[in-house]
Image (tube, rainbow, N blue to C red):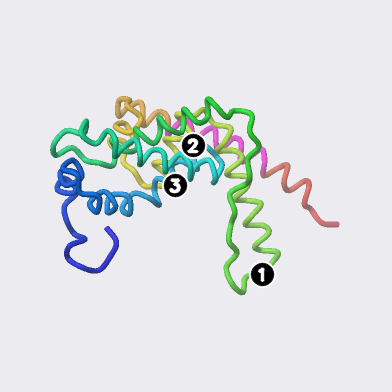
Amino acid sequence: MSGGSGRDEIPEPELVRAVQEGDERAFGRLVEAYLDEAHAVATGILRNRHDAEDAVQEAFIRALERIDHLSDGSPFGPWFYRVLRSTCLNLLRYEKRRDHDPIPHDASAGSNPETEADRRRKRQRVLDALSELPEMQRTAVTLYDLEGYSHREIAEILDVAEGTSRAHVHHGRNALRERLEGRGEEDRDQHQGP
C-alpha cells in the first residue's frame, strides 16, 4: 500500500471487512493498492488507454457494489481481477468496431531521438502482436510476463485450472514470438538505409 504511516499497513482482509462494514476510506486504500495494475491489465485486454480507464472505474464500482460476495479472508486481488476482466470483455462486446489510440510512450529526457524512435517502433510492434493473440492468451501473457502474477493467481483471475494458465502463457508466448519475428523482418526491410 502507498503512503508512509503505519495505518497504511492494514492487512488486506481487514480492509475488505472494513469496506463490507461501510468504510469508504478502506475502499479507497484498496483502490490505491490495485489501481496501477488494474490499468495495465485492462489496457492489455482492451488495447486502448481510454477504454481501459473506463473499464477500471466501472470494475471498482462493481467491486464495491458486490464486495459482500467476497468470502471472509479471501484475497481481494484475484476476485477484483475477475470483476475487471468481465467488465473489459463486456466493453469489448459492445465496442468492437471502435478506433483505438495507441498507448503513448513517454520519452525520457536527454535520449537520442533516433533511439527513442526505435524504442517506440519496437513497443508498437509488441503491442500490435499482443493485440492479435486470442483474449485468454493475451490476458495470461500480460498478467504473467508484464504484471508478474503466478500461474495460481492467473488461474483464479481467469477462472481456469492452473495448467490451463500455463498453457495459455506458453502458447501465447510462442504466438507472440512468431508474430514478432515476422514483424522484425518486415521492419528491417522497410527501415534499412542505403
Q: Position of residue 3 (x, y in %)?
A: 28, 65
Total label count?
A: 3
Identify residue for label 1: 112
Tell which tag, 2 or 1, sits nearer the viewer: 2
- From the viewer's perspective, tell me whether residue 98 is left or right of residue 59: right
Relative height, residue 54 to residue 29 (above, below): above
**Kind of residue at disc 1:** Asn
Identify residue for label 2: 45
For image coordinates 77% across by 46% down, the residue present is: 189
**Kind of residue at disc 3:** His
Label 3 neighbour load within 10 Å: few <14, some 14-19, many 20+: many
Identify residue for label 3: 39
The residues colored magenta run: 169-183
Q: CA distance from mark 1 to mark 3?
A: 29 Å
For image coordinates 41% across by 38% down, the residue present is: 58
For image coordinates 69% across by 66% down, the residue present is: 113
Label 2 neighbour load within 10 Å: few <14, some 14-19, many 20+: many
* Picture quarter with the C terminus: bottom right
Q: Position of residue 1 (x, y in %)?
A: 27, 58
Q: Secondary structure at mark 2?
A: helix
Q: CA distance from mark 2 to mark 1?
A: 31 Å
Q: Position of residue 186 (x, y in %)?
A: 73, 42
Image quarter of residue 166: top left
